[in-house]
Image (tube, grey):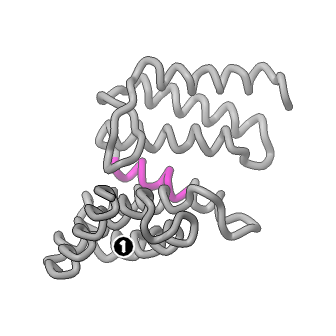
Amino acid sequence: HIGNPLDTLSIQKYRIIYQKFPLQNHLGRRSIGPKSDEAQAMAESAAADLERIYPMPNSTFLTVLNALAAVQFQNGNLDASAATLERVNQLLLGPLKRQPGRDSLLSNLASIRLRQFRLDEALALNTEALALSTADYGAEHSETAMVLRARGQILARMERFPEAEKNLLHAQQIFVA
């Protein structure tokens, strides 16, 4: 499929999304900047193109779906963003049951559930993300610290303040070190 014009077009659309709509940091993750229906339409189009091209998902398709979820989130479409991330999660689970970057995906999904006040779901997703991040990067890595910080925010919203403080302080220690 290398050199397929549709694949090239989809990749160009994906690049345009990031050129036209600057990246900003959201909870330590990359996401699209200002609200934009144009960016969302472009990401949806690129994802649809890639889905037609490849019978099995590839990394470009998953990257475009992640970009789509970021745009949906920035546009305030939390349900759509969560559905897109859940789809990516199911694709990542595949036959290997584990893929790199899944910790970030679960952490982002937990952040959406937190904003939707679905706190038990947010904590469960964050717990899985923390286990994966710790296994992939180690307990004292900045990726793990971002998950710990998000965990502290979830626990604080649940009014579990001693646990929240412990996680937030641990994350801060990692960032400062």
Q: Position of residue 36 (x, y in %)?
A: 35, 26
In-image side of 176 versus 90 (left or right): left
83 shown above or below 23: below
Residue bounds of the magenta highlight: 78-87
2 shown above or below 5: below
Kindly identify which residue carries mark 1. Answer: 121
Foreground pick, 10 / 63:
63
Give the SS element for disc 1.
Answer: helix
Foreground pick, 81 / 31:
31
140 shown above or below 28: below
Q: Amino acid at mark 1?
A: Glu
16 shown above or below 25: above
Q: Position of residue 127 (x, y in %)?
A: 41, 75
Residue drawn at point x = 29 percent, y = 56 percent = 176
Residue drawn at point x = 44 percent, y = 58 percent = 143
Foreground pick, 27 / 84:
27
Q: Position of residue 139 (x, y in %)?
A: 45, 71
